[in-house]
Image (cartoon, rainbow, N blue to C red):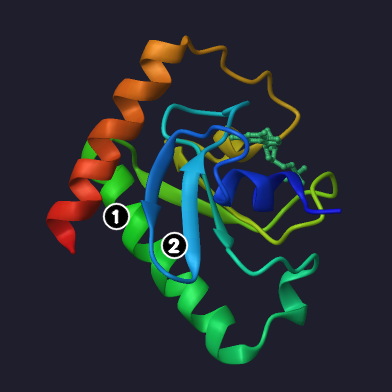
């Protein structure tokens, strides 16, 4: 069965899209630790990130860098946190999280509860910043 992220890539499940190219897709995490918390995934479904072929693996991180820089222009922060973390969804993903202190990366912290309009606004702004940087 297709992963929930494959179903998002295929448009079967809606997402707040941030950026896309032929191999990768970036979208807002629905349970964000911070505004702008984004997931970057390969379109080709692979569970464990270390099972990705080296060229695609490298490209995934370069794509995440571009997405992270676009997020930074919209969500002021000290750094962009980048972490490969999680056991829930069996589809490789990088979390990009705007941080101001190390505890902002803690997945034990309560998640933000944002309204649909807020997600839409954040996604549109980051998407615009990404396009301008491309
Ligand atoms: P993990 O495998 O990293 O523990 O969990 C996957 C991440 O994907 C979580 O941060 C979770 O909030 C997010 N997530 C799970 N399902 C969905 C979804 O349907 N849409 C979006 N945008 N994010 C999701």
Crowding near the residue tagged with mark 2, few <14, some 14–19, many ≥20 C-alpha atoms within 10 Å: many
Please tell me which of labels 2 and 1 falls first in the chain: 2
Extreme residue toward the left, this view: 132
97 to 68, vertically: above or below: above
Choose between 59 and 85: the one closer to the eye: 59
The location of residue 58, given as percent across then percent down, is 51, 82
Choose between 130 and 9: the one closer to the eye: 9
Query: In which quadrant will I find the C terminus?
Result: bottom left
20 to 42, vertically: above or below: above
Crowding near the residue tagged with mark 1, few <14, some 14–19, many ≥20 C-alpha atoms within 10 Å: some
The image quadrant in which ligand 1 is located: top right
Tell me the SS state at disc 1. Answer: helix
Give left or right: position of 99 versus 102.
Answer: left
The location of residue 49, given as percent across then percent down, is 72, 71
Instruction: Kindly indicate the quadrant of the structure image that contains residue 74.
Output: top left
Query: Residue shown at 44%/62% (left/top)?
Result: 64
Tell me the SS state at disc 2. Answer: helix
43 to 33, vertically: above or below: below
The location of residue 29, given as percent across then percent down, is 57, 35
Give left or right: position of 69 versus 61.
Answer: left
Instruction: Kindly indicate the quadrant of the structure image that contains residue 72.
Output: top left
134 to 118, vertically: above or below: below
Query: Residue shown at 80%/65% (left/top)?
Result: 47
Give left or right: position of 65 versus 103.
Answer: left
CB under 8 Å between discs 2 and 1: no
Query: Residue shown at 28%/40% (left/top)?
Result: 126
The location of residue 13, given as percent across then percent down, is 62, 35
Choose between 50 and 116: the one closer to the eye: 116
Q: Which mark is residue 64?
A: 2
Choose between 125 and 109: the one closer to the eye: 125
Query: Residue shown at 75%/69% (left/top)?
Result: 46
Question: Which residue is label 1 attached to?
Answer: 69
């Amino acid at each position: 069965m297709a992963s929930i992220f494959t179903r998002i890539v295929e448009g079967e499940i809606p997402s707040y899209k941030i950026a896309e190219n032929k191999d990768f897709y970036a979208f807002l995490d629905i349970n964000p630790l911070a505004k702008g918390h984004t997931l970057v995934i390969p379109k080709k479904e692979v569970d464990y990130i270390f099972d990705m072929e080296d060229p695609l693996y490298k490209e995934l991180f370069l794509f995440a860098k571009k997405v992270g820089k676009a997020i930074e222009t919209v969500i002021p922060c000290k750094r962009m946190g980048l972490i490969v973390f999680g056991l829930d969804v069996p589809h490789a993903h990088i979390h990009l999280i705007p941080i101001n202190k190390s505890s902002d990366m803690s997945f034990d912290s309560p998640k933000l509860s944002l309204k649909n309009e807020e997600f839409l606004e954040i996604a549109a702004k980051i998407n615009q910043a990404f396009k301008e940087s491309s």
